[in-house]
Image (cartoon, rainbow, N blue to C red):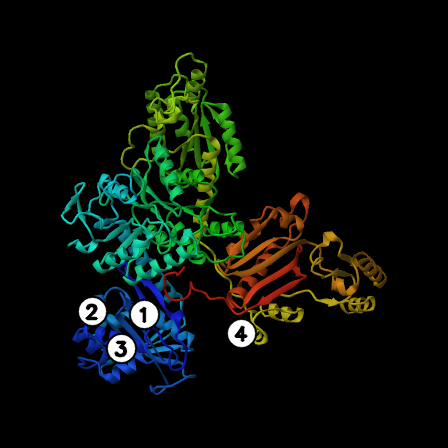
């Protein structure tokens, strides 16, 4: 049991689960007085060489004084952390605060001596690197800014741990000892090192789940149709290349084989190693199965059992206990309530899922939090996977269920450098760590397309079983931020599959210009209209007429692809009545050969199924007997519509021979709108890739006083935990970042208004600042261009007559700004998504239509430029209908300065500049509010840790 320390309560927030280099997990926690026996046992398992490296002398055992010293900490000046697996120590790290002379000290001394000891059996797993990240974070929390370590020259592994960490270092050699000193302030390099290690470790942990050498199905019953039995059958039928075991406590003791699979009553009875266990037993029996797997050394679990967080509060606590138990043994978990995992690689052939038929192998990775949606995705890809020139299938599939441990972030880490996955498709019902997901998505999208559909968008709460962080941002804002990170956001699983098939089969378009050709003028015009609706630039459709042969299609497609004014081609094809599969084969070959000659441009086919429609119409008018269903009722559609039929045109066109190795696969779509929508997403993604190659930079401004702003913020926050600044404080803080606010003077009486106007100089504006009238010129609470005192007093009387007493209106007088376009610039720190900069035009119309654009902070110069142009009303800034263009460079600079303010000072949790009047030359900030609060915890900047839900 953890106890209180000498000076501070036990710091439970230092506890963390981490993924190690080999994909296993360990728990890091503070060492307490209760750990004496664990420490002695740990030390006895360390080699003499490692002990010598730690103490610089032979040190066979710890004395009672040593044990007391290494287990008694004040958690301030003396701190020890241990990495544990199964409750036992595998490594320790300790720091002692020291002064300039190297002697024990207390604050304000800001240096500490640090030392590690790692059990030999666990060296090389990245344990010391993980401990260094966590002990450094603890030290920073305790105002320690620098570590010193003395290492023997022969201890190259420990020297490498320090030098590879990425901190700013100083190295010296004296008296046969290497002395390393390094600052603990995170650097760009240390953060990059940390994230690279995170990626390798998390990818490896998923790889161990998807490519196991041996799988045990726990709960494989003898009765066909059960969950465990179904998964066992699916694994066997898929041809799993590793060892397979059936485990069930109810098996007779003398049962050796079960359906030609080795049978055991317990995982502990299996003599060989087991990498993955699929647990399909009632929730009450899962803890026993997990304990046996942990003791046997199983690396990962897929728990398909239900009865966890999706079932209510008791189930949620059962789920938390499951995660704690699994991580205690260093395992990873998919589930609970999971559908399973699939890996179609010929070297693995794993179908540890409830899908009765493994999908065809291919280059698409699938992740679904919902089992039902996972089934639908696999089914649609199976139906749609056949293209004009070959098949597209799945590389890996993960259904995470309640995603209590392994999440979409982990799978993204795996897909990032998986050579078998070219496109990633994800169905998400919640995002547990949006900051991390956005970061990983941006990196993944720079290498391969990532298509996401998010369910439960309007439900107002996370699905049962999913623990997520609260966000104040509307779904549209979250979607915009994901698009900024390169994510291809679609709304339905149909669009998810449509986009995935195109991106897996075709090159990215170099622009929005689209050639359209086919044998139907009407279908060509529909495609043309769809392109315009999606923001593409279609060329006039080329009608080949219904008499067009395969050779005609080949020639037209070859010419279109050779045209430098074309970036992509949509082929529309309507089969002739009675057309044979041989004609489809010829058309497919003609399109394939023409596309192969121009491999840099994508080709899509819209293939309307008139043959099937003709069959349905013919059947409806026929006197022949109709097919009946199993209940004896007549089917309203012909049999070819209810199952795959090689004589149905779409099936004939898809069921062609496999394309030769290296040949492109041309996707076919049943509707022009679907094909064009997929193409439009590919065009936008390709543009994002080009932009991401040169993201711009965050500018430096010489007039920014970052230190002065920090001092002002500290002084203001000293008076309270969170506060909205007054006008003077707001102007003072913004001025530190070169943001000027046009002065507004209070006018509680007509005489005060006249005095304020004289101080400012005419012409002036009189504005009501009451909350219900603020920034609502449409309600009449603003009077502009008041040229003299008479007009001012008249306007004052009108406002008070219309809206009430001055104390209710809170009127102010402000100097007139040059005419221009009224805009709004905002920045907020969202607890889930992070710091966000928003921009739009001022006024009720823009707010009503949601015409607001967003970017993640820090914003680069290129992002600021795109932000101004990304709202639908942007033409008003650039001379719409003959009006004068306004000074958008000044607007972009303003947004960059706001971005810098919020990025430099996380205590600034909200900034609103409204209105910002952008004129032909320059701009004027007429209103500003700033809110300060203690900065929220930035877990994306801390040490690596697994989330706890």
Q: Residues within 10 Å of mark 3 (few under 14, many from 20)?
A: some
Q: CA distance from mark 1 to mark 3?
A: 20 Å
Mark 1 and mark 3 residues within 8 Å of each other at the beta carbon:
no
- The circle on residue 403 is none
Q: CA distance from mark 2 to mark 4?
A: 48 Å
Q: Which residue is mark 4?
A: 707
Q: CA distance from mark 2 to mark 1?
A: 16 Å
Q: Residues within 10 Å of mark 1 (few under 14, many from 20)?
A: many
Is 111 placed above or below 352 here? below
Of badges 2 and 3, the one in the foreground is 3
Q: Secondary structure at mark 1?
A: helix
Question: Residue at (47%, 57%) from the top-left corner?
Answer: 696
- The circle on residue 120 is 2
N-term mark: 2 or 1: 2
Total marks shown come to 4
Q: Is residue 850 visible?
A: yes
Q: Quadrant of the N terminus?
A: bottom left
Q: Secondary structure at mark 4?
A: helix
N-term mark: 3 or 4: 3
Q: Residues within 10 Å of mark 4 (few under 14, many from 20)?
A: few
Q: CA distance from mark 3 to mark 4?
A: 47 Å
Where does residue 790 sit, x and y in percent of width and height? 86, 62
Mark 2 and mark 1 residues within 8 Å of each other at the beta carbon:
no
Q: Secondary structure at mark 3?
A: helix
Of badges 3 and 4, the one in the foreground is 3
Q: Residue furthest top?
A: 623
Where does residue 162 sit, x and y in percent of width and height? 30, 71
Q: Which residue is mark 1?
A: 131
Mark 3 and mark 4 residues within 8 Å of each other at the beta carbon:
no
Query: Residue 791 lies in what quarter of the image?
Result: bottom right
Q: CA distance from mark 1 to mark 4?
A: 33 Å
Question: Residue at (17%, 73%) from the top-left corner?
Answer: 47
């Amino acid at each position: 049991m953890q106890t209180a320390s000498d000076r501070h309560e036990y710091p439970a927030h230092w506890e963390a689960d981490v993924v190690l280099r080999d994909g296993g997990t360990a728990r890091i926690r503070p060492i307490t007085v209760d750990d004496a026996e664990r420490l002695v046992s740990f030390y006895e398992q360390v080699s003499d060489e490692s002990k010598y490296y730690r103490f610089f002398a032979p040190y066979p055992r710890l004395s009672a004084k040593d044990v007391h010293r290494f287990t008694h900490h004040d958690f301030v000046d003396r701190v020890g952390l241990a990495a544990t697996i199964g409750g036992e120590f595998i490594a320790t790290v300790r720091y002692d605060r020291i002064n300039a002379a190297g002697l024990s000290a207390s604050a304000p001394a800001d240096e500490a001596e640090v030392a590690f000891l790692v059990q030999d059996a666990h060296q090389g797993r990245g344990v010391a690197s993980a401990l260094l990240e966590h002990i450094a974070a603890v030290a920073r929390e305790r105002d320690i800014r620098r570590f010193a370590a003395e290492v023997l020259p022969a201890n190259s592994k420990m020297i490498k741990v320090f030098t590879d960490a990425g901190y700013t270092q100083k190295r010296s050699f004296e008296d046969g000892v290497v002395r390393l000193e390094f600052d603990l302030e995170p650097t760009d390099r240390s953060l990059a090192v940390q994230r690279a290690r995170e990626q390798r470790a998390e990818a490896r942990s998923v790889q161990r789940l998807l490519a196991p050498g041996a799988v045990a199905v726990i709960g494989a019953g003898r009765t066909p149709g059960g969950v465990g039995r179904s998964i066992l059958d699916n694994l066997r039928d898929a041809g799993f290349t590793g060892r397979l075991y059936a485990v069930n406590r109810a098996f007779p003791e003398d049962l050796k084989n079960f359906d030609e699979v080795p049978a055991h009553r317990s995982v502990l009875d299996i003599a060989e190693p087991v990498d993955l266990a699929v647990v399909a037993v009632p929730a009450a029996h899962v803890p026993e199965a997990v304990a046996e797997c942990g003791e046997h050394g199983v690396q990962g679990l897929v728990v398909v059992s239900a009865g966890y967080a999706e079932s209510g509060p008791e189930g949620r606590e059962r789920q938390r206990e499951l995660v704690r138990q699994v991580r205690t043994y260093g395992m990873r978990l998919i589930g609970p309530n999971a559908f399973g995992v699939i890996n179609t690689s010929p070297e693995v052939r794993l179908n540890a899922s409830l899908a009765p038929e493994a999908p065809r192998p291919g280059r698409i990775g699938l992740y679904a939090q919902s089992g039902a949606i996972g089934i639908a995705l696999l089914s649609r890809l199976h139906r749609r996977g056949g293209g004009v020139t070959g098949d597209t299938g799945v590389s890996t599939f993960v259904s995470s269920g309640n995603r209590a441990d392994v999440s979409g972030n982990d799978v993204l880490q795996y897909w990032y450098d998986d050579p078998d996955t070219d496109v990633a498709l994800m169905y998400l019902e919640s995002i547990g760590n949006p900051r991390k997901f956005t970061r990983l998505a941006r990196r993944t999208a720079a290498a391969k397309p990532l298509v996401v559909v998010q369910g439960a968008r309007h439900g107002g709460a996370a699905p049962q079983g999913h623990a997520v962080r609260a966000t104040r941002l509307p779904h549209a804002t979250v979607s915009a931020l994901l698009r900024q990170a390169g994510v291809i956001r679609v709304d339905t699983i149909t669009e998810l599959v449509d986009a995935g098939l195109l991106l897996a089969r075709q090159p990215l378009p170099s622009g929005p210009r689209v050639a359209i050709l086919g044998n139907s003028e009407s279908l060509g015009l529909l495609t043309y209209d769809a392109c315009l609706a999606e923001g593409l630039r279609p060329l006039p459709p080329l009608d080949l007429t219904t008499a067009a042969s395969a050779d005609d299609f080949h020639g037209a497609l070859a010419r279109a692809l050779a045209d430098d004014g074309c970036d992509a081609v949509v082929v529309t094809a309507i089969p002739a009545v009675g057309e044979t599969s041989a004609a489809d084969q010829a058309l497919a070959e003609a399109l394939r050969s023409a596309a192969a000659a121009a491999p840099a441009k994508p080709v899509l086919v819209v293939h309307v199924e008139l043959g099937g429609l003709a069959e349905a119409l013919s059947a409806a008018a026929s006197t022949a007997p109709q097919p009946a269903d199993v209940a004896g009722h007549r089917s309203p559609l012909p049999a070819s519509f209810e199952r795959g039929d090689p004589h149905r045109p779409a099936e004939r066109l898809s069921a062609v021979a496999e394309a030769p190795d290296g040949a492109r696969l041309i996707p076919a779509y049943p509707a022009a709108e679907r094909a064009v929508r997929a193409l439009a997403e590919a065009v936008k993604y390709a543009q994002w890739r080009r932009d991401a190659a040169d993201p711009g930079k965050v500018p430096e401004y010489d007039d920014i006083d970052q230190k002065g702003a920090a001092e002002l913020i500290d002084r203001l926050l000293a008076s309270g935990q969170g506060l909205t600044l007054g006008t003077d404080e707001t102007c003072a803080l913004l001025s530190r970042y070169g943001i000027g606010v046009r002065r507004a003077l209070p006018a509680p009486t007509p005489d005060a208004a006249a005095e304020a106007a004289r101080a400012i100089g005419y012409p002036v504006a009189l504005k009501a600042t009451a909350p219900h009238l603020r920034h609502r010129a449409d309600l009449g609470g603003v009077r502009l261009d008041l040229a003299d005192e008479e007009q001012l007093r008249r306007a004052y009387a009108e406002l008070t007559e219309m809206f009430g007493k001055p104390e209710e209106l809170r009127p102010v007088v402000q100097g007139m700004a040059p005419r221009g376009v009224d805009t709004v610039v905002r920045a907020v720190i969202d607890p889930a998504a992070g710091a966000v900069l928003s921009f739009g035009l001022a006024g009720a119309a823009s707010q009503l239509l949601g015409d607001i654009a967003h970017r993640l902070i820090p914003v680069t110069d290129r992002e600021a430029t795109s932000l101004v142009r990304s709202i639908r009303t942007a033409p008003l800034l650039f001379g719409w209908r003959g009006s004068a263009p306004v000074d958008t460079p000044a607007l972009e600079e303003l947004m960059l300065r706001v971005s810098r303010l919020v990025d430099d000072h996380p205590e600034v949790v909200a900034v609103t500049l409204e209105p910002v009047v952008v004129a032909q030359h320059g701009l004027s900030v007429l209103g500003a509010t700033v809110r300060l609060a203690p900065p929220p915890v930035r877990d994306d900047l801390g040490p690596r840790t697994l989330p706890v839900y």
